[in-house]
Amino acid sequence: MTFYQELRGRPLDAFGKTEDKLLAKGTAQLGLSRQDLIVRPLMPSDLQAALMSWNFAITTTSSLSTLINAQTITDNRFCSINGICYPETTPLFDWVRITRSGSVARLWPIEHIPPQDDNTMWVDDPITVDQNTTITIEAYNDTTTTNPTENLIFIGLVVEKRGMVLNP
């Protein structure tokens, strides 16, 4: 796994392959044609984020903060996380751990993201999460803080049955 500052080259290829993979899962598992599926950007509600935003409560001491706690991806929906935007000027999180169906699927160090020009990193090994699958996302804070929240934006795709959110 490598991090990239721009969506080009290997991360762009991974992004395209992830979209193809999600579309293949959607057509196979839902029995729908490509025309019956929508591809759209990932939203906090897709991961069942508690506040329905990318703003998360964190622990005030050095420890692991649970951002998304064992949430189940909605039926007829397939998600991916292809990158992270970390817009904080003084970041507290050092790494993110993503657990899918009870097993750790990704462990991404993120402390180097905020100094980048656009505060965004792209990965060449995106994670996909199928319908009715649980996901937990945790972040490690290695300092004591009085800041109760932190912005951490997950960038990805959703393939879902047409009409669930969008019906163009």
Image: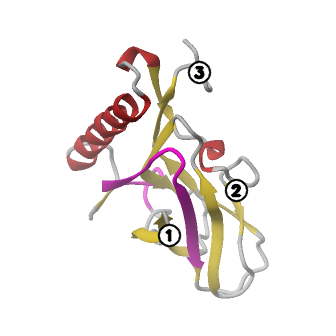
Foreground pick, 15 / 36: 36
Q: Which residue is mark 1?
A: 102
Q: Which residue is mark 3?
A: 166
Q: Quadrant of the N terminus?
A: bottom left
**How is colour applied across the structure in the image?**
secondary structure
On the image, the x and y values in percent for residue 135 come to 54, 59
Q: Which residues are magenta?
A: 116-140
**Residue 103 is covered by the magenta coloring:** no
Q: Amino acid at mark 1?
A: Gly
In the image, residue 10 above or below residue 107: above
Which quarter of the figure has residue 140? Answer: bottom right
Q: Amino acid at mark 2?
A: Asn
Q: Is residue 51 left or right of residue 132?
A: right
In three-dimensional space, the C-alpha distance between marks 1 and 3, rounded to whole angstroms, equals 30 Å
Nearer to us: label 2 or label 3: 3
Please indicate, yes or no, whether residue 168 appears anywhere in the rendered image.
yes
Nearer to us: label 1 or label 3: 1
Q: Quadrant of the C terminus?
A: top right
Secondary structure under the numbered disc 3 in the rendered image: loop
Q: Which residue is mark 2?
A: 55
What residue is drawn where x is 70% and y is 56%? Answer: 55
On the image, the x and y values in percent for residue 138 come to 57, 70
